[in-house]
Image (tube, coloured by chain):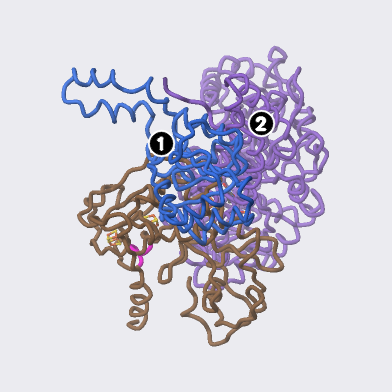
Chain colours: A purple, B brown, C blue
Amino acid sequence: MKPEDLASLADKQRAINAACKHRIGVCTESGCVSSQSDQIAAKFNELVKSRGLQKDVRVVGVGCMGLCGNGPMVKIDDGAPMYQNVTPEHCAAILDGLDSPLGNPQLRHLLCDLNQPFFRRQKLVVRSNSGLIDPEDINDCIAHGAYESLLKVLTELSPTDVINQITLSGLRGRGGAGFPTGLKWSTVAKAGGPSKFVICNGDEGDPGAFMDRSVMEGDPHRVIEGMAIAAYAVGADHGVIYVRAEYPLAVKRLTRAINQAMRHELLGNSLFGTRFNFNIEIRLGAGAFVCGEETALIASVEGNRGVPRPRPPYPANSGLYGCPTLINNVETYATIAPIIREGAAWFAAIGTAKSKGTKIFALTGAVQNTGLIEVPMGISLRDIVFDLGGGVPAGRTFKAIQTGGPSGGCICGQNLDIPLDYESLAAIGSIMGSGGMIVMDDTSNMVDVARFFMEFCMSESCGKCVPCRVGTWQIHHLLDRIYKGHGAPEDLVLLKELCEMVKATSLCGLGQSAPNPVLSTLRNFESDYLALIEKGRADREAALSGPHDSGTTVPLEVIS
Amino acid sequence: MNGGKHATAESITLTIDQNAISCRNGLSVLEAAREHGIDIPTLCWLEGLTLWGGCRLCMVEIEGSPRLFAACATQCTEGMVIHTQSPRLHRYRRTIVEMLLAERNHVCSVCVSNGHCELQAMAQRLGVDHVHLPYRFPRLSVDNSHDFFRLDHNRCILCTRCVRVCAEIEGAHTKDVKGRGIQAAIIHDLDQPWVESQTCTSCGKCVNVCPTGALTHRGTAIGEMIKKHEFLPYLKLMREVHQ
Amino acid sequence: MTAPLNKPKVATVWLDGCSGCHMSFLDLDERLVTLASLVDIVYSPVVDPKEFPQHVDLTLVEGAVSSEEDFHKANLIRRCSSVVIAFGDCSVTANVPGMRNTWEPRALLDAAYVEKATSPAEAANRKARIPLKVVPPLRAQAVPLHEVIPVDVFIPGCPPPADAIWQVLTELLAGKTPDICAVTRFGR
Ligand SMILES: Cc1cc2nc3c(=O)[nH]c(=O)nc-3n(C[C@H](O)[C@H](O)[C@H](O)COP(=O)(O)O)c2cc1C
Ligand code: SF4
Ligand code: SF4
Ligand code: SF4
């Protein structure tokens, strides 16, 4: 399309939207769909038809509104009122209350308090349109500002300007390690070569994490736009989105979004009449955690077994098919358009000295409010657990919060007041990670928690290097032994020794970080380990006759 | 990856274990060290094959970084100060060998490669007189189907030398790895018995590069399986001469 | 070395092994005479006493810990010995006895006693003969000695060569720490 077409398309769609008195947004992301939100949308459509309201009321499928634990969610107009735990039976009453700005009083029990900290304390940058726009309708997205930043970049900024903006914004990669995005882009931009690639990492393999899925399902055009801007900045003309096949809805939305963008000539050749060409293809991963590691991901895209390789060379210099390749996380790309639109300074003003902007977390576990939250960097964990999360359920006490999934650590109550940023989390033995956040109460045993994550790493290890392949098995074996009451005090020494060794010698991030949950629970919750060992010792002593058998670490399983 | 042959004329100087040495630019730390008689232990690395970086035995310390580096995968740079021996590295290396011994069923006393096995020799060299980790004792199969060769998964350390030599030198790519983590295993073609492989040329290269008794000639008795991987640098050289 | 009256007491024990390590020990040949002047062999398959003594300075243990009897004996040895030596690969790694570990003990006994039967009647007959009472019950796995009790010195080898045994013993008796890997290795 021509540059001026974007604004006119947006105006046209805004007029269409405005002509309609009410807009009923039904969440159609995986979480709510799994509790039948598609039936709710169908019911609304049926009622709108039978009541003859087609001209005044539009039912749209929208992206996630955050409070996934209370889904399905339904949002009226631009946000208020919002209903939670909706079933098809409620649809008629919701329609009845459309004209009242506070919603139908008869459905008071379903009305969501939008003033509660869960919503009030969020800061929506990446998710600003999620829950508002219809992700399957590019026109609706354009009416909400999609591709404006791309237009600005292509017509007003040089690649260097773009990279400078991203550098100034202080954005760091959201895929886990927090590498400065501007620096990565400039490395790829400087790398020579006839062709370059940009890859979007949508593998999202951490158990419990679904931030990236939500972005891909709820606002796919924002990801595409971010990738196009990145491609322009680094000099690439081909993009790949790597999504796990377990995310069929994300794949469907992205595919549709790419097709629509191509039809609107927002992907393809000579975008906005410039010399910039950019195409995107989707590659499906088979759902291996390790394929989220960048070199393994590249191997997988090339059609090889998804196994990491030693770096350097980094993908920035030698990536896909040996070409310079920019690889960023979904959320990282989705942050680009807002930065271009609002300016680097605006973004850099959010957050802490070294961690800028906002971060999405998947808040789960022993809290009242579970779901997706986007919060400014620097917010304290205490605020997340007790304010946004509403605290642990009544009658239980807070024990730990786990961040960073299988690569992260368990943080105890003492450290709840640290600001949430890359450095502070690392200092207390955890990591920011991609955004998993599990709250645990006093019913959780930390040895069991460590064992769970180690089991995950053990089965997701690619098996290439010895410390990770065998070490994760050994560590899991020890944890299992301790948890089942067969552990000895010496096992803790061995456990620490193995963790240290696996961390120091593994080839890729999976093995290097796999011991983190064990080390952090050993540091913060050693009493859980000691109690199990002591109990096991007492049990064994009671069970065995005579002093001969004490001190063994071998369970007595004999045949008779 | 083995940049030696593509080295530029310039040479660089660095320090390995207190020895100031100079070497061609482009060498890996492992190659530079070995050129100067400093032997860093390895199991997956083999002259003539591409870099794998899986055994992690060659981890070294480089001054200025708290991290460890795999010598096989680290290029020498001017002024680098490298330590290949330290109590910590020794401990880690021993643990790696112990992990391999505990992972599968390495019963040296009844192995045809007894006395000619790189894993066994590595254990002895690194002072591993016992394995302080729990043994796994997995139940694994032996592929006895091929007329000449045998693959005994009990003795495989997943170094992938066989995979690489088959793909890179023989050009057959019969062998590969299936599965993940502790379940990973060497396979032929699409995980079929070796004899049914359509691609295997029965060249025997995999048998000769295998560091352990996992790949052997059939009909050898205990201690009789002597490996010969000298053909590799020779073949590689011949190819380069032809190019 | 030591005054004859309080010579160090040495024991050798045979758990789940083939006795090859003891054969290698006997291969010390004429050095056995020297050894006899240095130590008292207080307990061993090759000497008379049937009770493991209350106190032994140095005990060589051949074989893996495989049965309940092995298990109790290992614990007894540990309580009564100052220095425990895992003697040979079976004791150090579980070696050949450990090759049964991928089977359940029951399946193992069936394979050994029943499966070769030629008729159902014979199978039933053989089943009755599985020695569950007479011989000590098998433990789930045959394991190295150090997985059951703390071990002070390891002499790998199947069997460890007589020279290695000699070297290790004499150095230990002289109060030195032997360099085991210089004289023997797994398998041998
Ligand atoms: C085992 C492992 C799994 C990973 N999984 C993901 C993932 O699912 N998504 C992701 O964006 N990055 C993942 N990463 C990080 C990537 O390697 C890479 O650093 C990241 O995609 C870079 O993007 P960023 O700079 O935008 O963070 C993973 C890393 C490791 C070691
Ligand atoms: S650390 Fe684990 S996942 Fe990474 S290369 Fe090694 S075995 Fe594979
Ligand atoms: S014999 Fe040759 S072709 Fe066959 S698997 Fe081995 S290396 Fe490959
Ligand atoms: S079969 Fe031999 S060469 Fe192949 S991976 Fe196993 S140990 Fe290495």
Q: Which kind of residue does numbered mark 2 sit on?
A: Thr
| Residue position marked by numbered label 2 in the rendering | A364
User: For the view shown, which residue lies furthest in the top direction?
Assistant: A106
Q: Nearer the viewer, residue C154 or A329?
A: C154
**Residue C38 rendering spot, x and y as whole percentages:** 56, 52
Q: Main secondary structure of the magenta part?
A: helix
Residue A381 — which label? none
- Which quarter holds ligand 3? bottom left
Dot 2 falls on a residue whose secondary structure is: strand
Residue named by callout 1: C101
Is A317 placed above or below A446 here? Answer: below
The residue nearer to you, when weighing C95 against C22, is C22
Question: Which of these two is toward me, A233 or C140?
Answer: C140
C70 versus A167 height, above or below: above
Which segment is the magenta one?
A: B164-168
Measured from the top left, where is residue A27 in percent x and y?
Answer: 59, 30
In the drawing, does residue A470 fall left or right of residue C108?
right
Secondary structure under tag 1 reads loop
